[in-house]
């Protein structure tokens, strides 16, 4: 028996088989509990990154210049020219990231990325010469605009990193990592037209209609939107003994589609110059929004520090 009384005092029979069984079970449970104990704090890492981004805005022009009569009539196009110049400047990024080590080589986490201002500039020079057969008039039209857009964005994304292999040395280890991410970007577009010049004139005639708009004559516009974004990355993780780890990386980010100078289909014209120089009917020279959706993406080189 396990317990017995002697003069009202309770004693344990250590030679009892039941006691031996309970002792062994208790030892096994304690041993398993110690093996399964997890140090949760060691599985989390925090990091901050800084980098340079090379952005691109794909797609057709956001603005266009066209010339057409107010009423249908026969026209013969003699010459047309369009010269387009687009420029988008490099910028910078900041990122804060927290990761949890799900497996020895797999980490999952959240990232908050801030893109610095991206300055986009677009110019279009347009010229056309056409014959109006009804009165044998040659009409010349020219147009020019200079458009500027400032783009800023904040991205919140769920990310994962996978470590492919590690080279270990005496005081340093180097690992190759790749990552993917999916999230949402909050984008702000501030657009304006700093210069517009539209001209209608008859060939061999002094009759000319010019309109020149200077900075501030066409109001600035701000548009805010949210897009679905995804990204892929690759980098070299370097861990130094008794010093913070850091990573040198490359990242491709698709920020989604945006529209500059978005207009309703019935109100796409931003400015119209109308002339009666043909002597037959009005001719229109129009600066209009194309309402084109354009894809915004960037390539970045960055350095990331882990704490």
Image (cartoon, rainbow, N blue to C red):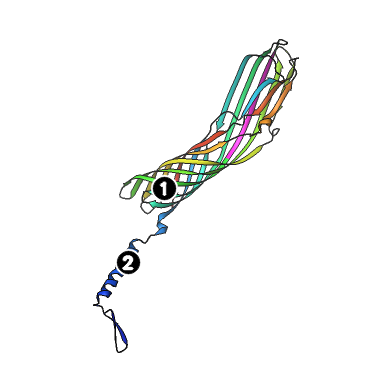
Q: Where in the figure is residue 207, as x and y percent of width and height?
A: 74, 16
**Which residue shows up at 27% across the image and 71% down it?**
21
Q: Where in the figure is residue 70, as x and y percent of width and height?
A: 72, 21
Label 1 sits on a secondary structure element that is strand
Q: Which residue is mark 1?
A: 246
Question: Visible in this render: residue 304?
Answer: yes
Q: Tell me the number on the disc at residue 22.
A: none
Q: Quadrant of residue 123?
A: top right
- Of 124 and 21, the residue lying toward us: 21
- Of 251 and 136, the residue lying toward us: 136
Q: Which residues are magenta?
A: 138-151
Q: Residues within 10 Å of mark 2 (few under 14, many from 20)?
A: few
Q: Which residue is mark 2?
A: 29
Q: Quadrant of residue 199?
A: top right
Structural distance between the alpha carbons of marks 2 and 1: 41 Å
Mark nearer the N terminus (2 vs 1): 2
């Amino acid at each position: 028996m396990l317990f017995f009384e002697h003069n009202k005092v309770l004693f344990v029979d250590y030679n009892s088989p039941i006691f031996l069984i309970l002792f062994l079970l208790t030892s096994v449970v304690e041993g398993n509990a110690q093996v399964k104990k997890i140090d949760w704090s060691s599985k989390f890492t925090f990091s901050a990154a800084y980098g340079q981004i090379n952005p691109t805005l794909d797609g057709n022009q956001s603005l266009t210049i066209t010339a057409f009569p107010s009423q249908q009539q026969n026209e013969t196009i003699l010459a047309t020219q369009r010269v387009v110049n687009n420029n988008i400047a490099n910028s910078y990024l900041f990122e804060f990231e927290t990761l949890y080590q799900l497996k020895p080589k797999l980490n999952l986490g959240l990232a908050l990325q801030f893109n610095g201002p991206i300055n986009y500039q677009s110019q279009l020079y347009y010229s056309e010469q056409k014959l109006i057969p009804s009165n044998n008039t040659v009409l010349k039209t020219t147009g020019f605009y200079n458009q500027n857009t400032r783009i800023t964005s904040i991205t919140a994304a769920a990310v994962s990193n996978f470590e492919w292999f590690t080279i270990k040395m005496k005081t340093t280890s180097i690992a190759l990592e790749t990552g993917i991410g999916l999230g949402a970007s909050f984008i702000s577009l501030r657009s304006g037209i700093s210069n517009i010049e539209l001209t209608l004139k008859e060939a061999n005639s002094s009759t000319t209609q010019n309109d020149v708009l200077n900075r501030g004559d066409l109001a600035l516009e701000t548009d805010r939107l949210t897009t679905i974004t995804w990204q892929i990355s690759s980098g070299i993780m370097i861990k130094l003994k008794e010093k913070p780890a850091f990573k040198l990386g490359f990242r491709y980010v698709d920020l989604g589609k945006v529209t500059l100078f978005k207009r309703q289909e019935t109100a796409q014209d931003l400015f119209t110059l109308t002339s009666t120089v043909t002597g037959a009917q009005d001719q229109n020279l129009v600066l209009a929004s194309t309402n084109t959706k354009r894809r915004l993406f960037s390539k970045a080189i960055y350095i990331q520090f882990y704490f």
